[in-house]
Amino acid sequence: MEALGLFASPAEAATDFAPPRAADLPDAARARGTKVVILGAGTAGLAAAYELGKAGYDCTVLEARDRPGGRAKTIRGGDKLTDTDGVTQVCRFDDGLYFNAGPARIPNHHVTLDYCRELGVAIEALVNANAESLYYHENTGSTDYGELASTPVTHRQAKADVYGYISELLAQAADQGALDTVLSPDDAERLIELATSLGGLTGGKYAGNSRRGYVDAPGAGHDAGVVGTPPSMSAILQSRFGTRFSFEFGFDQAMMMWQPVGGMDRISAALAAAIGGRRRITYNAPVTQITNLPDGVRVSYRQGGRTRTIDADYCIATIPPMVLKTIPSNFAQATKDALAVPTGANTGKIGLQYGRRWWEEDDKIFGGITATNMDISGIWYPSSGFLGRKGVVVGYYSGSYTDLPVADRETRAVAQGVKIHGAKYRDELETSFSIAWPKEPYSLGGWVNWPGGRGAAYDQLLRPDGRTYFAGDHLSYLIAWQAGAFESARQVVTALHERVAVTAA
Amino acid sequence: MEALGLFASPAEAATDFAPPRAADLPDAARARGTKVVILGAGTAGLAAAYELGKAGYDCTVLEARDRPGGRAKTIRGGDKLTDTDGVTQVCRFDDGLYFNAGPARIPNHHVTLDYCRELGVAIEALVNANAESLYYHENTGSTDYGELASTPVTHRQAKADVYGYISELLAQAADQGALDTVLSPDDAERLIELATSLGGLTGGKYAGNSRRGYVDAPGAGHDAGVVGTPPSMSAILQSRFGTRFSFEFGFDQAMMMWQPVGGMDRISAALAAAIGGRRRITYNAPVTQITNLPDGVRVSYRQGGRTRTIDADYCIATIPPMVLKTIPSNFAQATKDALAVPTGANTGKIGLQYGRRWWEEDDKIFGGITATNMDISGIWYPSSGFLGRKGVVVGYYSGSYTDLPVADRETRAVAQGVKIHGAKYRDELETSFSIAWPKEPYSLGGWVNWPGGRGAAYDQLLRPDGRTYFAGDHLSYLIAWQAGAFESARQVVTALHERVAVTAA
C-alpha cells in the first residue's frame, strides 16, 4: 500500500531509532566507560539516561525539583507548589483524584506509546472528542454569533446541523450545475450521493434528524422519541460552531487519544525506576554552573545548602532554554545567543474538584472537552473514574489566568463555567488547584515558542557546544508533546554514541 | 437551555421511571405478597426481577441456559456452545482474552450506564471510531470505486481528503455566487470561512495537509515531516469513503461509547447477583408450557430430566418471540398471531486470537473498526488489553457467514482480512471462535425484525395476555440494544405494579 504512495502512514515512526549498544563501541571505550551528566529529569533527560543506559553509559541525572517528570506533572492531594511570585498552593483533592497539569494526551502514533509498552505503563482512553460535550460562543465586541450566542449546544447537535446544511448546499449546487466546470456528470452524481448521506438529507433538504439528539429520547412501547427542529441555516452559519470541527481532524488531536492509567507522571516514574532511581538521579539539585572542559564537562549544582561538582565525559542539557540561559556557563556566544531566543508559552490549567460527577449524572458527558470562546478556552471532563462519586474537571486550559491571584482564578473559571452548566458549577465545587506554567520555577513556560519560527537559534542548539548537547521537545517538530522530548533525546543519544565510538576508536 | 428548545438533550432519560416501592401498595397486597415468574434471565428478565425486588415482589426467574445474560454473551476460553445444527465449538482463547458476541457497545445516553453505576460495574471506552482504522472498498459487479478500489485508507486520510474537496467546492460555489438565492452575502462569507477551516484550504483550494497523516512523520531536529499528496477530487468522490462518515454521527453510535471492564456479561452477572443469584434464578430450565389461570399463571419447565411446575400471580415472558411462539400456551389467538410475526436477525461474529497485537505494534491502531464493503462488514480491533501481548480481533460482524461450516467461516474471514492487513492476518492467527445468532438455541437471531415495521403485532405484545406480560428490546424503539431491554422491563414493571396496587385495593 505504501508503495502506491496513497496510504500516508501515521504509523511510521518519526525516526528509525536503534538504541545504542555496547557492542557498537570499540573495546577501549567499553573498558574505560563513558560518563554522562544529564541536566533535568524531565521526559527528555530520563529518556536519554534510559537509552544510554542500554549501552552501559554511566549516567547521572541532576534535577532541581524533588521529583522526576518536569512538566509531565500530575496534581494530587497533598501536592505543594510555590510559584515564582512565592505564592504557595497546597492541593486538597481527595485521595484518588487528580488532573494532569502539563501534557495530558497521547496520540496513537507517538513514540510515547512505544515507551509505555516497553516500560509496562498501562494506558486508557483520553476522551478528546465526545458528541455530548458542548460548544459555547458568546458575542464579542467584534463578532455577533446570532440566535445561538450564549447557548451551549452539544457537539452532536452542532455536527448534525452544520453537516446537514452544508450538504444541502452542496447537493443544490451540484444539482443545479453550478459545479459543472469542475465536476463531471458522474462526479456530480457521486457528490449528491455523498451529500445526502453526510447531511442526512431528505429530498435534498436538511430538516433535522436523530443525529442531533432527541427532545424526548426513544424508549419502550410506543415511545418512538421526538427529534427537535434545527435552527435555520443562517443561524447555524452565524454560530460558527462548524469552524471548530477541524480540531478533531488534527494529526495530533484526532481520536483515539490516550493517557496513562493513574496520571501522566506514571511514565516519568517508570523511566526513573528503569534507570535506577536515586542511584542515578539526584533530586533537589539545581545546576549553578556548566563548564565545557577540553575533554569533558564540569557541572556545579546546589544541594543541601552546599555547592557540589560533578565531572563527566559528556553533558546533555534538557533544561528549558528560558532557565538554562540564566545559568553561568562557558558556552560559545552563539549558543548563549541562541538560548536567549525562545520564549515560554503562557498557559495554565485549573482543576476543580466536585463532590458529585454531575456532568455524567445530569448531562451524560463522559469525558471530552467543551470548547468556548471565553478565556477559559476549554473545560475538560475527566477521562477516568467514570460512574464514580467525585471528580476533577479541568476548568480552564488557558494562559489568560496567569496573572490573576490564585483565588481569582477559581472565581473567574467558575463564573464562566456557570454560564454553560448553571449554578451547580459553583455550588457543588469542593476545592481547586491551579497552575500557571510561566510562574513555575525550572519551567518558566508551558512549552517553548520560537519567535519567527525555527531559525538560526534552533539550528544552533541542535549542535553540541563542546561536549554539551541540548535536548528537549523544544528541539523538535513536536513541541509541547512528550513525543518531542523522546525524539529529541533519541537524536542526541544517537549523535553522542556515534561520537564516542569514533573518539574512542 | 432546554426551555429554549435549542438544546435537544440526549441526556434526557427515555422514561421517567420510578422503581416500584412496597409503600405504593395497599396493606393487603403487602401482607399477601405477590409472586412473579419471569421467563428468561437475559437483560430484560433480570432487570424486571431487580426492579420488582425493590418493592418486595417474590420473583423467580427461569432460564433455559446455564448462565444469565442471554445474547449479552462474552466468549472466553473454555466456553462451549452447541448450535441448532448440533455443531459444538469449544473456545481455545488464552486466559484473559475475550470478545463480546452480542451487544458490544453502550452509548453515553443509554440507561444501561445508569445500571452500571447503580450495580458498580466498571466501564471503559469502546473505541467505535478511530482515525487510524481503515476504509476498504473493492469493486463489485455494479460499482467501480476507481483508483482507490482495493486500497485500505485510514479514516484520518479519507476525512481530510473528503472534507478538503467538498469544502473547496463549497467555497467555490459561494465565491462565484452560485448560492446567492439561498445565502445572504454575510452568510456566504461565513460559509467560506467555515469551508476554509473545515477543509484546511489554502487560497480556496485543498492540496493535502497533516490532517491526512504523514508519509514521513515529524520528529526531532530538522525532521519537519513530509505530507503526502492527495488523490484527485474525482478519485476521492469515486472511492465513496465519504458515504461512511455519517456512521459516526449516529445517535447510538457517536463517540464516546463504552463497555464494561472485563466483558459485557459483567452487567448480567451483577444483576443476577443483585437479585439473589440461584436463590431467585433457576438455570437449565427451558419452559415447556405457559397457562394463564383466572387468578395467576402456571409455568411448566424441564429440569434435570423432569417436568416441574411453578404457579405465580403474574408472569413476565422475555423469551424472544421466535422461541416463545413454539412453547405451548393458552394465550389468546391474537397473542399467538403476534408472536409469529417478528423474525430473527441474521447476524454473527468471529473472534480471531492473534499471538501478537500487530494492529497496535505495526499499524498504531488502538481499537476502532475498519469498515469494508466485503461480507465481513467490519473488523473490530479490541478496546481492552492495549499494549499487551495477544489480543482478539472481531474478524467479521455479519450474517453472511451463518450458513458456512465453522472452519469455513474462519477461512473466509481471514482471506478477506489478508486483503487489508496482509499475510500476518493469516500467519499470526492462533485460534478462533464464531457465533451465528440464528443458530443459537433460545435466541434464534441476533435481534428481532418487525417485517413492515412496528404494527398491530407489536401493539398486541405491549398488552398483557391475561396475567402474562411481554418484555424485551424487541418491544422498544431500541432494538438490539440492552437499553431497549431495560426500558421495556421498566415499562412492564410499572404496569404490573400499578395493576397489583389496584387489584389488591
Image: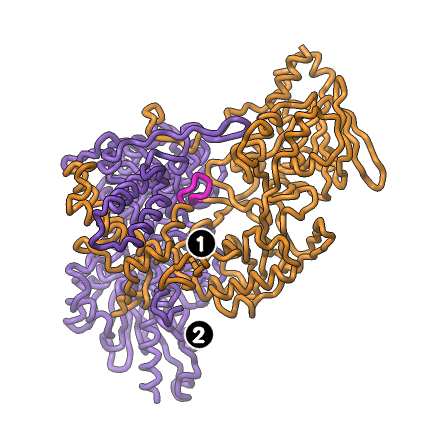
Chain colours: A orange, B purple
Q: Give the residue at mark 2.
A: B54
Is B406 one of the magenta-colored residues?
A: no
- Of tags 1 and 2, the one toward the viewer is 1
Q: Give the residue at mark 1.
A: B260
Percent x, y of residue B176 = 24, 44
- Residue at 36% of width from left, 61% of height from top? A146
Q: Amino acid at mark 2?
A: Lys
Circles 1 and 2 on the same subunit: yes
Please name whichever residue, B195 or B299, is drawn nearer the observer in this view of the structure.
B195
Which is more N-terminal, label 2 or label 1?
Answer: 2
Q: Chain of mark 1?
A: B
Q: CA distance from mark 1 to mark 2?
A: 24 Å
Mark 1 Cα shell of 10 Å, populated few (<14), some (14-19), many (≥20): many
* Residue A426 seen in render: yes
Q: Is residue A502 shown above or below B184? A: above
Q: Is residue A329 left or right of residue A202?
A: right
Main secondary-structure element of the magenta-colored stretch: loop
Q: Is residue A275 shown above or below B12? A: above
- Residue at 52% of width from left, 26% of height from top? B222
Which residue is most to the top?
A: A505
> What residue span does the magenta drawing correspond to?
A249-256
Mark 2 Cα shell of 10 Å, populated few (<14), some (14-19), many (≥20): few
The quarter of the rendered structure image containing the N terminus of chain B is: bottom left
Q: Secondary structure at mark 2?
A: helix
To which quarter of the image does residue B233 belong?
Answer: top left
Percent x, y of residue A143 = 41, 57
- Residue at 35% of width from left, 89% of height from top? B505
- Residue at 14% of width from left, 38% of height from top? A185
Percent x, y of residue A293 = 76, 21
Q: Amino acid at mark 1?
A: Pro
Q: Chain of mark 2?
A: B
